[in-house]
C-alpha cells in the first residue's frame, strides 16, 4: 500500500505542476513527444492495468544487465532501455525463529525472494509461498499469491521459465511448500507432511497442475513423469493428471507453435531438466583469464522454443476481455553466473531482453498492459579493467570477451573458491554465491510509476495486482 500512496501523491503533484506551468507545459508538446514521454503521461492518468506481464531475470543484477548491454555494443540499446520508469528494490529475506519478529538474512535465495513479490510477505530461504517458521523443515502458513488473486478475479494466468517449471521462481505463483526441492512426486522425502498421501497439497508439479494455470511452459519434464501417491489422481503421472484436467500437452517448439485453441490450458515441457542455453564461449580461469574471444551464439536446439517465442505464444493464448497475468522467467542468467560461464550468462540475458521486446511490442497495441521487469537477487559477476596486471589482477575467476564493438569486456567472479587459510583459491570454479545488493526494477504502462525510488521486493505484490 505504501507504493500506491506514493504513486497517487506523485501523480497529483505532477498534475498540479503541469497545470501551473501554463505556456511552459504547452511548449512541452510543441514537438512530437518521445515514446518514454507518452508512456509517462499515460501512466499519470491510468493506474489500473487490464493485463500484467512480469519479467524476472534470475540473478540479473545491474552488472549482469550491463554486461549484456556492453557485449551487444554500447550504442545499441536493449529493449529494457525502452521502459520509462526505473527504481531499485531491496531483497533481504528472514531467518527461521520463534517469531513474530524474524531476523534479516541479507543474501537471499530465489524461493524467499519469489515469495516476496508473489505474496507481499517475507519468508525464509528455500520456502515457497509459505510464511516463516521455527525451522527450515517446519512448514509455515500458506500465503495467498498474486496468481491466485488474478484467477479469483476471472483473469487468465500464465507461468513461463527457461528452468524446470517447478523451480523456485515459477513455483511461487501456484504452489505452497516448505522446501523448494520438493518439485515432483519423486522428490517429496524432505516434505513428508505435505504429500497428498499425508493429506497435503503434494509436490510443486502436482500443485501447478491442480491450480489449472492456463499456460505452463518450460523445462522439467522429469518432475511430471513420476506417479502421484494419494488423492484423486493417485496412480497417474502428473502429465496424465494434467491431461485428465483438460490440458493440451506439448513437448517441442513445433507442438507449441501448433497450439491455437485458447479455451484449453496448455502444458509445455520442452526438456527433461532445465532448457538449453542460447550461447557458449570460453571458460573462466583464475586470475587474468583467457585471451579475448567472442561468444558463440545460436546454440539452443531448434526443438526447444526460445523465451521470446514462449512469451509470444503465451500472450496469444491468454489474451481475453477479462485480462491476464503472465510471469516470464529468464532462469539461467543465475545458473550460468553460478557456473562462471560468462557467455552462457550474457546469452540468457540477451534472450530475456528479446522476450521483453515481444511484450513491449504488444503493449504498444494494448496500452492497458503493465510490464514490470526485475531480478530476484543480485549475483557475483563484475565488470573489471581489461588492462589489469600484477597485483591488480583479480583473485577470482575471469573471462575476457571480444564485444561487438571489437573491444575486450573482462568479467570476474569472486564469491566462491576459498582454498583455506593461507591457500590459493581452488583451481576448478565452484558454484558462485548470490550477493545481497539491491536489484533494478523497470516498468512501463498503467501503474508503472509505483516502481520509482527505492522500495522492497514485497511492495511488488501490490504493483502486480495483489
Image (spheres, rainbow, N blue to C red):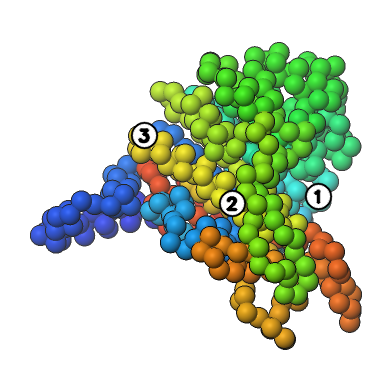
Q: Is residue 455 above or below residue 203?
A: below
**Residue to which mark 2 is pinned:** 349
**Residue to which mark 1 is pinned:** 136
- Is 106 left or right of 86, judged from the image as shown? right
Q: Nearer the viewer, residue 356 or 75?
A: 75
**Residue to which mark 3 is pinned:** 366
Secondary structure beneath label 2: helix
**Mark sitting earlier along the chain (2/1):** 1
Q: Position of residue 364 (x, y in %)?
A: 36, 39
Q: CA distance from mark 2 to mark 3?
A: 25 Å
> Are there few (<14), some (14-19), or many (20+) residues within 10 Å of tag 2?
many
Q: Is residue 75 above or below residue 123?
A: below
Q: Position of residue 375 (x, y in %)?
A: 58, 53
Q: Position of residue 135 (x, y in %)?
A: 81, 51
Secondary structure beneath label 1: loop
Q: Is residue 48 visible?
A: no
| Residue that appears at 60% across and 37% down | 306
Which mark lies nearer to you, 2 or 1?
2
Amino acid at each position: 500500500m505504501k507504493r500506491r500512496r506514493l504513486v497517487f501523491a506523485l501523480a497529483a503533484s505532477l498534475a498540479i505542476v503541469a497545470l501551473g506551468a501554463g505556456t511552459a507545459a504547452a511548449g512541452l508538446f510543441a514537438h512530437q513527444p518521445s515514446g518514454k514521454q507518452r508512456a509517462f503521461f499515460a501512466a499519470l492518468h491510468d493506474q489500473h492495468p487490464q493485463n500484467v506481464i512480469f519479467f524476472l531475470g534470475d540473478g540479473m543484477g545491474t552488472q549482469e544487465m550491463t554486461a549484456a548491454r556492453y557485449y551487444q555494443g554500447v550504442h545499441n540499446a536493449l529493449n529494457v532501455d525502452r521502459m520509462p520508469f526505473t527504481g531499485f528494490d531491496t531483497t533481504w529475506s528472514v531467518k527461521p525463529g520463534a517469531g513474530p519478529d524474524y531476523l534479516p538474512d541479507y543474501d537471499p535465495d530465489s524461493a524467499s525472494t519469489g515469495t516476496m513479490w508473489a505474496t507481499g510477505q517475507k519468508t525464509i530461504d528455500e520456502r515457497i509461498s509459505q510464511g516463516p517458521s521455527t525451522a527450515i523443515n517446519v512448514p509455515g502458513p500458506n500465503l495467498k499469491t498474486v496468481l491466485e488473486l488474478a484467477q479469483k478475479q476471472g483473469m487468465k494466468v500464465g507461468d513461463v521459465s527457461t528452468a524446470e517449471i517447478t523451480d523456485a521462481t515459477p513455483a511461487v505463483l501456484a504452489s505452497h511448500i516448505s522446501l523448494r526441492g520438493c518439485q515432483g512426486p519423486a522428490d517429496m522425502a524432505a516434505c513428508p507432511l505435505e504429500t497428498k498421501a499425508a493429506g497435503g497439497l503434494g509436490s510443486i508439479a502436482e500443485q501447478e497442475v491442480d491450480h489449472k494455470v492456463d499456460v505452463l511452459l518450460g523445462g522439467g519434464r522429469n518432475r511430471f513423469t513420476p506417479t502421484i501417491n494419494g488423492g484423486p489422481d493417485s496412480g497417474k503421472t502428473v502429465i496424465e493428471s494434467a491431461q485428465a484436467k483438460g490440458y493440451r500437452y506439448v513437448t517441442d517448439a513445433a507442438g507449441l507453435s501448433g497450439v491455437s485453441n485458447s479455451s484449453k490450458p496448455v502444458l509445455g515441457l520442452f526438456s527433461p531438466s532445465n532448457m538449453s542455453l542460447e550461447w557458449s564461449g570460453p571458460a573462466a580461469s583464475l586470475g587474468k583469464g583467457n585471451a579475448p574471444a567472442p561468444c558463440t551464439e545460436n546454440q539452443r536446439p531448434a526443438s526447444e522454443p526460445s523465451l521470446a517465442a514462449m512469451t509470444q505464444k503465451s500472450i496469444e493464448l491468454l489474451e481475453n476481455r477479462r485480462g491476464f497475468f503472465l510471469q516470464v522467467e529468464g532462469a539461467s542468467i543465475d545458473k550460468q553466473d553460478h557456473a562462471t560461464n560468462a557467455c552462457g550468462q550474457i546469452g540468457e540475458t540477451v534472450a530475456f531482453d528479446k522476450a521483453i521486446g515481444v511484450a513491449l511490442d504488444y503493449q504498444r497495441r494494448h496500452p492497458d498492459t503493465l510490464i514490470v521487469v526485475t531480478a530476484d537477487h543480485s549475483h557475483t559477476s563484475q565488470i573489471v579493467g581489461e588492462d589489469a596486471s600484477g597485483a591488480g589482477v583479480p583473485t577470482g575467476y575471469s573471462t575476457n570477451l571480444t564485444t561487438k564493438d571489437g573491444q575486450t569486456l573482462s568479467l570476474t567472479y569472486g564469491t566462491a573458491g576459498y582454498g583455506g587459510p593461507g591457500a590459493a583459491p581452488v583451481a576448478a570454479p565452484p558454484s558462485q554465491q548470490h550477493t545481497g545488493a539491491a536489484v533494478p526494477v523497470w516498468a512501463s504502462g498503467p501503474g508503472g510509476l509505483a516502481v520509482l525510488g527505492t522500495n522492497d521486493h514485497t511492495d511488488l505484490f501490490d504493483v502486480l495486482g495483489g
